[in-house]
Amino acid sequence: MSQLRQQFVSIDSTPRNCARLCATNPSMTPASDATTSRSTALDQRFSLPFLHRVRFTHDVAALTNTTLADVFCDDAAAPTRRAVLVMDSGLHAATPTLAQALVQYSEAHASSMPTLSEVLVVPGGEQSKCGMHTVEQVLALIERAKICRKSTVVVAGGGAVLDAAGFAAAIAHRSVRLIRLPSTTLAQDDGAMGVKNGINAFGKKNFTGAFAVPWAVICDQALLKTLPIEVFRAGFSEAVKIALLKDPKFFAEIAASATRIAAHDLAAAQPIIQRSAALHVEHIAQGGDPFELDEARPLDFGHWAAHRLEALSAYAISHGDAVAVGLLIDCRYSMLKGWLDASAFEQIRNVLADLRLPHSHPLLANPDAILEGIEQFREHLGGSLTITMLRRIGEGMEVHEIDLVLMRRAILQTSTA
Ligand SMILES: NC(=O)c1ccc[n+]([C@@H]2O[C@H](COP(=O)([O-])OP(=O)(O)OC[C@H]3O[C@@H](n4cnc5c(N)ncnc54)[C@H](O)[C@@H]3O)[C@@H](O)[C@H]2O)c1
Ligand SMILES: [Zn+2]
């Protein structure tokens, strides 16, 4: 944290720097060294094609809806042998017949998919990502039900349960097939679209995890009906995020629908969720860095502060709400730096307000505690500090240093907003 006490932070520990170090210190110059020149290189470059199957549907468990059965038999050469269902307890409580309906569905579609041989209900919400409990339960299920690498874990729930169960699926037998049925707005418009799985550890968000491309993601609009209103609204901060980065027209569409969305209007919400999902999938599949090897992480705009706020609040604030606050901090900082004009900032603030998302949090009164999130973010990414800021609505920009005086001001102004 010592760097953060200086006025500017600029952290660079990349291989470029190592090369620079070697050049100034002959004892560290490996290329011309006699010992290393005797080594034999067997390097091979290889790449793997992935198919990221993402479907939107209505009433996935209806016997006449073939979406789920179809994705199971999509690879005729390697049909799924067995399958189990993991379900979020919040979803299960809100829709008690769903698990049984999915089991009956699997029996009715036996020519396309295996029967869901067991149903495991796990605690919903962030608690499923705090500690190994859910991961261990799912690993035990995989072992018990003899789920092999040609078998499938179907997981239905919010982003937290998808992350924890997905992590178990990614590490069991070094990865078994996973079908995600996201059941929150956030999971459908962002969380389930990615190739990341994981849990929180050491007081840090997503510290333990693995990249794994799911077999399929099926978003059932009907599942969103039972969401508590604050969970329903929270998902739209991620849609605002991606619109701010990539698509000003989409931002205008969200602005036009925001008050209807805040009132749990599914018809208004659906096109926004689907467009957000499409932009996230497109970025992951076409952006050139699906496994986040580069330093830039544009999809994490607003997230350095959001993740810190979540951890500091012991996960009392939801991810979606924290992202809304994190976006406001970074948009305000972008305005204070003179990159984003004041009217654009007002538009962003108004959209978040119309969505009835939080605009502040009491923990922002201690900006230094929030600022720890910058170093944690750099550590999580590795390499040099790279944070996305906003140049204008629809266009992000990468920065490699943060003016801490202005960032403190941005946090404090957000704390009193
Ligand atoms: N892997 C990724 O790329 C990625 C991306 C974004 C977010 N995330 C993660 O997603 C998590 C947030 O997910 P979330 O916003 O979906 O919240 P959540 O998973 O915490 O769920 C919120 C609540 O809704 C309940 N619930 C779920 N579906 C329901 C339904 N249909 N009806 C009634 N209740 C229901 C849950 O039981 C829980 O209590 C965070 O941990 C975040 O880090 C992951
Ligand atoms: Zn997020």
Image: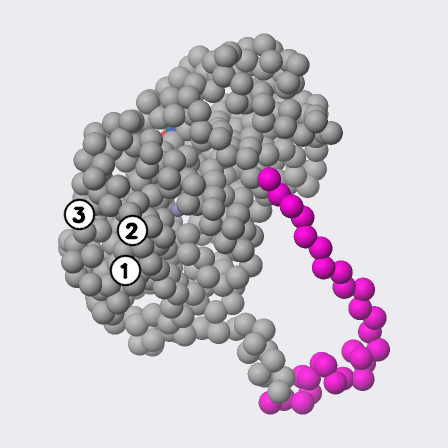
Question: Residue 38, percent across and down?
Answer: 84, 78
Disc with the residue nearer the chain's start (2 vs 1): 2
Instruction: Kindly tell me whether mark 1's CB lies below 8 Å from ligand 2.
Output: no
**Drawn side of residue 332 relative to residue 221, left or right:** left
Q: Which mark is residue 80?
A: none
The span from disc 2 to disc 1 (Cα, nearest Å) is 9 Å
Instruction: Kindly tell me whether mark 3's CB lies below 8 Å from ligand 2.
Output: no
In the image, residue 12 sits, relative to residue 412, either above or below, namely below
> Is residue 41 in the magenta section?
yes
Disc with the residue nearer the chain's start (1 vs 3): 3
Are the two marked residues, 2 and 1, in contact with CB atoms closer than 8 angstroms? yes
The span from disc 2 to disc 3 (Cα, nearest Å) is 15 Å
Give amino acid for label 2. Pro
Query: What residue appears at the point 18 percent right and 41 percent down from the top-left corner?
Result: 354
Question: Which region of the structure is painted magenta?
Answer: 24-51
**Drawn side of residue 8 relative to residue 256, left or right:** right
Q: Secondary structure at mark 3?
A: helix
The span from disc 1 to disc 3 (Cα, nearest Å) is 16 Å
Disc with the residue nearer the chain's start (2 vs 3): 2
Question: Residue 301, percent across and down?
Answer: 37, 55
Which quarter of the figure has residue 73?
A: top right
Residue hosting label 2: 248
Residue hosting label 1: 392
> Is residue 99 in the magenta section?
no
Residue 57 seen in the figure: yes
Give amino acid for label 1. Arg
Residue hosting label 3: 350
Query: What residue appears at the point 36 percent right and 52 percent down from the top-left corner?
Result: 246
Q: Between residues 118 and 275, which one lies in front from this camera angle?
A: 275
Q: Secondary structure at mark 2?
A: helix
Question: Residue 247, percent across and down?
Answer: 33, 50
